Amino acid sequence: MAYVLPDKPLPETEPPGNLFVAAEEILSVVQPAAYEAGRRVYLDIEFGYVYGTCRAVMMPIEIGAVLYRPEDDSVRYVGEQFCYDIDVEIWKKVTDECGKTVGVATTVANMGRGEYGMPYDHSYRSPGDGVSAAKATAKKAFADLRLFMESVVSAGDAPAIVVFAADMERRAFRTAGFSLDGCMLVDLQREIRRHFKMKQVLSLDRLARLIDFSADDSIVASTHFRYPVPREYRHLLAAHRGMGDAVRTFLLAREFQENLLHLEERIRSLMETCEGESEEGGCRNGSAGDATDGTAGT
């Protein structure tokens, strides 16, 4: 899922094509029959604008994926950071107690050097041939993304890739030259909106609250599900990180799959508590809000 301004989309490298499927097909993927084999890949890509390019260059900076086998209820975690010596903008979303976004703050990071939290100056412009160099680096990062995706689906037993808000991932796959032949791209956010007949979509932040998502030192959990997390991924479980949002998407899909009535009750309650159904505005009960670290992508 990507949180980016819409006036600078990723470049299109081929006609859009039909990457989505009919609603009844999506529901059969998100809510598979108990006997159905094959992995589901739940993933999130985080993106960053290259600092100083006026949002002209954007690149993937990390990805997280949960590989789920429904036949034995097993999970595997895979992820990668695309670490290049280049400064990118890191966004911080501020949410109220209803999970609505009420503000955004920006810092700068260089993942190649392991530097984070550097000050952001909106007037800064990359000197000389900085934009050309940024495009070359972004091209390398997209090539890394293609290799990662090919390794995840290479076994041929992953009929569906499930993401939350699919537009940025879909464009990123095209830019990276990754083909979705043989698998479906499922937009869980869109499917939840369609199923509950909502006027507006709900953010992953809000839905994660509704399923009581939590992540401690070794376990990720929702209202009805708990899964262990290997030590090497435990520090990556924050919201708006690639692995963190992949895990939140996975557990949300499990709740949507097996506890639909309970999720519907929570959504209706939220609509009664918070003003309106849109992502705009504050919570009626009021809150100073929570700051959640993230990248330009979520």
Image (cartoon, rainbow, N blue to C red):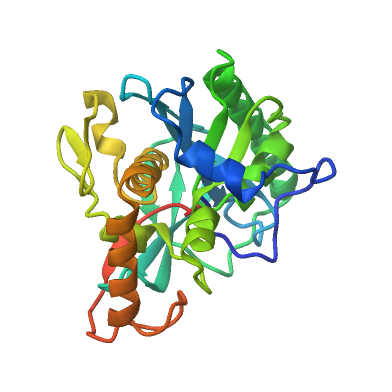
| Left or right: residue 14 compared with residue 218 | right
| Residue 69 percent coordinates (x, y) | 39, 23
Image quadrant in which you'd find residue 144: top right
Q: Residue at x 51, y 68 (%)?
A: 197
Q: Residue at x 52, y 39 (%)?
A: 28
Q: Residue at x 54, y 23 (%)?
A: 158
Q: Residue at x 67, y 24 (%)?
A: 182
Q: Is residue 152 above or below residue 186?
A: above
Relative to the observer, which residue lies in front, 28 or 219?
A: 28
Q: Is residue 7 above or below residue 282?
A: above
| Residue 12 percent coordinates (x, y) | 79, 47
| Residue 125 percent coordinates (x, y) | 64, 61
Q: Is residue 37 above or below residue 276?
A: above
Among all residues in the image, which is located at the extreme top?
A: 155
Relative to the observer, which residue lies in front, 60 or 54?
A: 60
Q: Is residue 15 above or below residue 55?
A: above
Task: Mark yes or no: residue 158 visible.
Answer: yes
| Residue 61 percent coordinates (x, y) | 51, 40
